[in-house]
Image: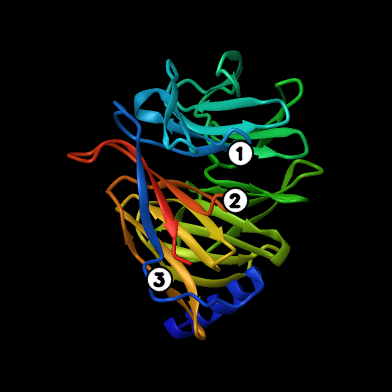
Amino acid sequence: MNRRAALLALTMAISSMLGHSSHADDSAPLVVETKIPLGAVRGRIDHLAVDRSRQRLFIAELGNDSVGVVDLAAGKLLHRITGLSEPQGVGYEPATDTLYLANAGDGSVRLFTGDGFAPIGTIELGSDADNVRIDPRGYVVIGHGDGALAIIDAASKRKVADIPLAAHPESFQLGAERIFVNLADRHTIAVIDRGSQKQIATWLVANARANFPMALDEANHRLLVVFRRPPLLVMLDTRDGRVVARLPTCGDADDLFIDRKRQQIYVSCGEGTIDVFGLKDDAAAKRGPVATVSGARTSLFLPERDRLYLAVRASGSEPAAIWVMRPSP
């Protein structure tokens, strides 16, 4: 597929996925509105999560063995949970007001209250506890080890099942009937049937390796995946794994989000870039890139606040901070 054909295919796919036409202007797609200092935080920063009711952002400060808590309304650091072991996944479960912190260092998941951040338990997963997903059906799903998804009952706060995988799971998304999992070491996408909790398909994208971030638009049968080698944004049909389109993107990507209001896709990359893909005229076009800071590869887009929050680690003269990025109209 040549570049023009690829652009057109992505245009048609995203148009279908998002359901309306775009009227984006030529202004910068993302603007740094403010920077929220995180204080004395060293090393790598990993994933983010949110408590929407209290307007609190949680930041997995992996290299600092801590999780920062930012008050989004006040725009300042509220609290820091310390004494962790390389936290990389974080999730807030609102029904039980519980914060789940997944630790790569010792494989534990540490539980805290959502109000005062008091420790209330530990779930041992063995090794490399990673991404956390909150299932509105009453479960918390956490990737871990050499290949498994742990299913935790939110009410009892106990692991009730493990879904085996062929390799360590990176980003994964929970659909109504299936779970889609990036197996970066195998360069494949595992498809899990939620009813049987068994893998029912393996999808391989030709000439693409190291798939990390993922986003799902199940209603329109679209799965977005970014590969790092080479850096590619790939769109697949969730019904059969067929590749709908693929486009070059920035390097060392770790998060990927869909902004349905603007028909835009945000890809945050450790090379110091956020790629913004949007629709203009009859072709999918890269509206960025937006320059950030080397190593700033994790982010969280909150549609209800209409902001992208980028985790920026300390480097040189740049202190650790959350960059609050406002999309253009």
Q: Nearer the viewer, mark 3 or mark 1?
A: 1
Secondary structure type for disc 3? loop
Label 1 SS: loop
Expressed as whole percent of the image width and height from the top left, the position of residue 6 reads 49, 79
* Colour setting: rainbow
Q: Which mark is residue 52?
A: 1
Q: Which comes before the other along the chain, label 1 or label 2?
A: 1
Q: CA distance from mark 2 to mark 3?
A: 22 Å
Looking at the image, the residue that sits furthest to the left is: 316
Compare marks 2 and 3 and give the one earlier in the sequence.
Answer: 3
| Three-letter code, disc 1 | Arg
Front residue of 162/62: it is 62
Q: Amino acid at mark 2?
A: Glu
Coordinates of residue 90 in the picture (x, y in percent): 53, 32
> Are there few (<14), some (14-19), or many (20+) residues within 10 Å of tag 3?
many
Residue at x 53%, y 63% (from the top left corner) = 205
Where residue 150 sits, quadrant-wise, is: top right
State which mark lies toward you, 2 or 3.
Answer: 2
Asked whether the beta carbons under mark 1 and mark 2 sit within 8 Å of each other, the answer is yes
Q: Which residue is rendered at x = 57% and y = 14% of the image? A: 118
Q: Which residue is mark 2?
A: 304
Q: Is residue 51 left or right of residue 39?
A: right
> Within 10 Å of the Cα at label 1, are there few (<14), some (14-19), or many (20+) other Cα atoms?
some
Q: Are marks 3 and 1 in contact (CB under 8 Å)?
A: no
